[in-house]
Amino acid sequence: MRWLALLFLLCSPAVVAAPGGSPRRSTGKKPKAPPPAATKPAEQERTRYSLALAGGAFHGGGFNRGPQGSAQLTLTPPGWGRFAIDVELGWRLARFRRDIPGSGGMVSALHSIPLSAVGRMNLVRMAHLRLDVRVGVGPLLALHHLSSDFSSSSVRSALGWELLAGAQLRFPLGTLEPFLDVRVGLGEAYIPFVTGRLTGVQGLLGVRYQLP
Amino acid sequence: MRKPVSIAALVLLAACQDWPELVIRSVSPSEMRASEATALALDAELPLPTTVDYGKGTLEVDTRVSVSIGTLEVPTLAVSPQGVISTRVPSVLVPGSYDVKVTLGDGRTAVRRGGLTVVEGVWPEGYSIDPIGPQRRLEPFTLTVRATGANAAAFRGNVRLETGVGGSIGPRVSEPFVDGVLTQQVVVDSIQSNVVIRVTDIAGHVGTSNTFTLQ
């Protein structure tokens, strides 16, 4: 029965919507509220925006690990139903230090800054729990900073790409909405002499605010 | 439409940046006497090439730094954490202006045009070489050379070392004289059994050793 209920949740247009969106009413039941056409608020006729900030960590094997952050602007155009688009700006940092025999300490820091266009589809919508899947792609700026006790520091950069796929579990609390974001990333930006994975398995905790 | 595309292209170009340029900020002193071996300090920005592997957590730094004055390669004695390269220029350059070039292990270079000026020197009148006894091929022995004539006691330059046809001597440029005297280990090889060592400076002064047996 649980599976039937889940299937119903997934398939019914009445229970899916993008962040902040209102569900469409099904036609098979007597509506408890007036028909949407008669009472649809004016704001539902325009694109809705929400802004999210999140922080977490990533791991891509070895020293390809570290903190990360993300800012997401979600656009839900009218009539898109369960779908929405995120514009996401991220930041990740992998950093380590080594002692070079006879010379001194050296620190390598690899920053990656992806800018992604992400498609979002709402799968589950309940009163205080929503689940979205997200797939995105976009350019990735990689910055490699080397500093040491014995050599001039250097910053090198390269442009690459990133592809991400993941899920977002949201907990709506009015205009604020805490969420848990889990994703897997794949990407590349070539900086000579640097072998590193700029992405990997990523987990973030964040909060979304429905813009007025 | 063309303007945003141009801006985007510029941003893309600006976003891709490789190693920063090497810069020689100063050469000190910027002038030397042709007859004196001179210690030089090159203040430079040296982002040393480093290979980074985040999977293994390794950093491999290529610390090779070479310096040349004109076409003359000079030894890199030390590189300080502040990027000051210490080197010593032998007195084998004729008066004039020379470019100073620094080369890193990955081939990147920085050139300071006319970074070193060599002015006329004060040379001894000649050289004498202390008697040399029988020697063995490729076995080091001590060579003593003395500057002679006026200015001899103040001479702190270098001389070139050579042997006759069919022979070789190492090193080919001596260490600097100390107050007119050079005492140095040399190695000689020759197809001849009787050998003469000859010293010369760039001003044309010469000294010749006795003929010694090489076994």
Image (spheres, coloured by chain):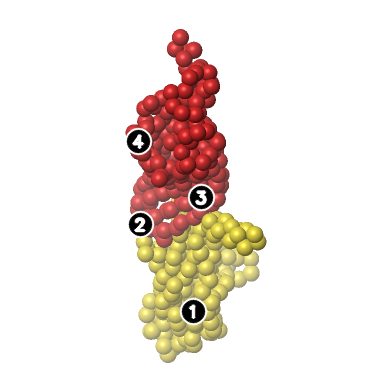
Chain colours: A red, B yellow
Which is nearer the N-term, disc 4 or disc 2?
2
Please identify the quadrant where the C terminus of chain B is shown.
bottom right
Q: Amino acid at mark 3?
A: Leu
Report which residue position mark 1 lands on: B116
Which is nearer the eye, B27 or B33?
A: B27
**Helix, strand or loop under label 4:** loop
Measure the alpha-carbon separation of dots 3 and 2.
Answer: 27 Å
Front position among marks 2 and 1? 2
Chain under callout 1 = B
Q: Which mark is residue A141?
A: 3
Report which residue position mark 2 lands on: A149
Q: Is residue A58 left or right of residue B100?
A: left
* Quadrant in the rendering for residue A202: top left
A151 over A197 or under it: above or below: below
Measure the alpha-carbon separation of dots 3 and 4.
Answer: 35 Å
**Helix, strand or loop under label 3:** strand
Residue at the location (38% across, 26% down)? A127
Q: Which mark is residue A174?
A: 4
Q: Are marks 2 and 1 on the same chain?
A: no
A151 over A122 or under it: above or below: below
Q: Is residue A113 left or right of residue A176?
A: right
- Residue A209 can be seen, yes or no: yes
Q: Amino acid at mark 2?
A: Asp
